[in-house]
Amino acid sequence: MRNGSIHRDDRRKYDTRHPLKRHWISALALGIALSGGQPVSAETLKDALAAAYMGNPQLEAQRAALRAIDENVRQANANYLPTVDGNYTHTERGLTIGVEGQPSEPRTDFNTENYRAQLDQNLFRGFRTLNAVKGAKSQVMAGRAQLTDVEQQVLQDAVTAYMDVVRDQAVLALNQNNVQVLERQLEASQDRFRVGEVTRTDVAQSEARLEGARSQVLNAEAQLATARAAYERVIGRPPSSLKTPDERPVLPPSLEDAISLATAQSPGILQAMSNEQAARYSVREAEGALLPTVTAQASLQRFEGIQFFGEGFVGFTQETREVLLNVAVPLYAGGGRYSDIRRAKQTRSQRMLEIRQAERLAQERARVAWDNYRAARGQIISSEAQVRANEIALDGVRQEAAVGSRTTLDVLDAEQELLDSRVSLVRAQRDEQVAAYTLLSAMGQLTANGLGLEVETYDPIANYDKVKWQLFGW
């Protein structure tokens, strides 16, 4: 680590310089296997991320929301095309003419049929259709950026859930092992008490520590159950045998590079920029309401009828064709159109400010994630050194207690300090992985494509191309 930078050479040195990390993880895996049993194959972090990508309902819901946004383009394009309506009316009417006190005249029947077809075509709408289409396309781009943001959130939740289970499994194994150690310590204290080497106080101290350790096991089990529930919610299935990741994702060499990538690729910024473009076209669309509107209309109407009277009938037919050109010039609408323009301009100002806010937020996230990652790496180095020192100290205290220069309480304290340092190491390892993926998320790289997940990635363009000019069907 040089001048706040993380280099690949440093990562290689870090892995080889601290062999305790690899041995310690192996020991934790062995402890978990002894305590609960494991299947032969382990589920990797990428397996969990792939499962979350393929089946998380939050991500599926956002994909459906984007498909709904795609329809805005189709609806805007509809104003380029004509509308055709048809109408049919059938009428039957009977009429009997009579005068009071006289015989009725023969019945007269009228049967008519009316057919009408009409076509309406917009010729000019003050460029509102053009700007509506462009605005709808900008909304689609904003929706795609939002989908990427949700994808990153889901994958970040998956990383956190995975590492929480790994951490809590290891913490539980450590606490279970600590109970076994304290049980042996209590047996030894009781044996020494029977031969008069220690007092009843030493036995009571061992009993108290053992009960405290058992309580910690219960707490660890509850914490693990919570983590497993969160894992199942995000991933969609219960955790089986989770494997601690062997590698960290590739990260930029410096904070400046991380901030630069976040500013260029953050989905939040891309979404804000697309929203601003959509607002810009909304202003133009509102201004178009002040321009004339030109429409064309063509209609064909056919009227057929038959009149029955007595023993005879008369048929008749009427056919009408019309072609109209309508020009509507807006003169005054109570100030509503001007209000629409002012509102659209203020909305665009809001969207422009949201871009600045999104940039600041992305840069802040990159800085915080970078600092958290560096802190976690430093904590791992310190925790490994602390574990080594506590192992040496515990061994020495036990030897000194055997010759009477240390008390039982000294041994118990040394064992507790070793346990605490091992738990701290496990937590730091979890924090390092989570911080690394959080930094990827801040830079807009925590995606299925960015991580190289072996899944069939969702293509938002396919549905867009399908519906943007779809004339029929749903």
Image (cartoon, helix red, strand yellow):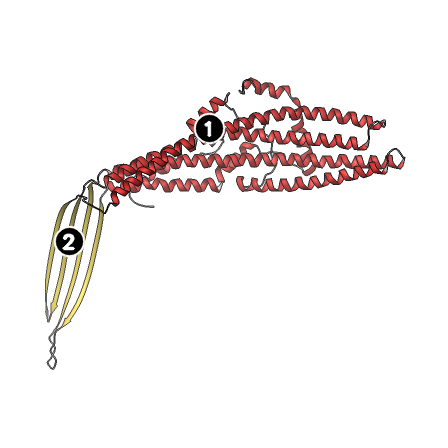
Q: Residues within 10 Å of mark 1 (few under 14, many from 20)?
A: many
> Which element is circle 2 on?
strand
> Which element is circle 1 on?
helix
Residue 459, can we see it?
Answer: no
Is 106 positioned to the left or the right of 132 in the image?
A: left
Can you tell which quarter of the image residue 185 is in? top right
Q: Nearer the viewer, residue 203 or 58?
A: 203
Q: Nearer the viewer, residue 248 or 37?
A: 248
Compute the Cα span from label 2 to label 1: 66 Å
State which tag comes first along the sequence, 2 or 1: 2
Is 261 positioned to the left or the right of 120 in the image?
A: right
Can you tell which quarter of the image residue 99 is in? bottom left
Does residue 420 lie above or below 317 as drawn?
A: above
User: Which numbered disc, 2 or 1, marks the residue closer to the eye?
Assistant: 1
Is 387 positioned to the left or the right of 4 in the image?
A: right
- What x and y, as percent, mark residue 89? 20, 59
- What x and y, as percent, mark residue 318? 11, 56
Residue 254, can we see it?
Answer: yes
Residue type of the residue flagged with mark 1: Gln
Residue type of the residue flagged with mark 2: Gln
Residue at (60, 38) in percent of width and height: 240
Which residue in the structure is indicated by mark 2? 301
Label number found at residue 380: none
- What x and y, as percent, mark residue 113? 17, 59
Does residue 89 lie above or below 210 as drawn?
A: below
The N terminus - image quarter: top right
Residue at (64, 36) in percent of width and height: 169
- What x and y, as percent, mark residue 244? 60, 30
Which residue in the structure is indicated by mark 1? 363
Q: Residues within 10 Å of mark 2 (few under 14, many from 20)?
A: some
Is 218 positioned to the left or the right of 335 in the image?
A: right
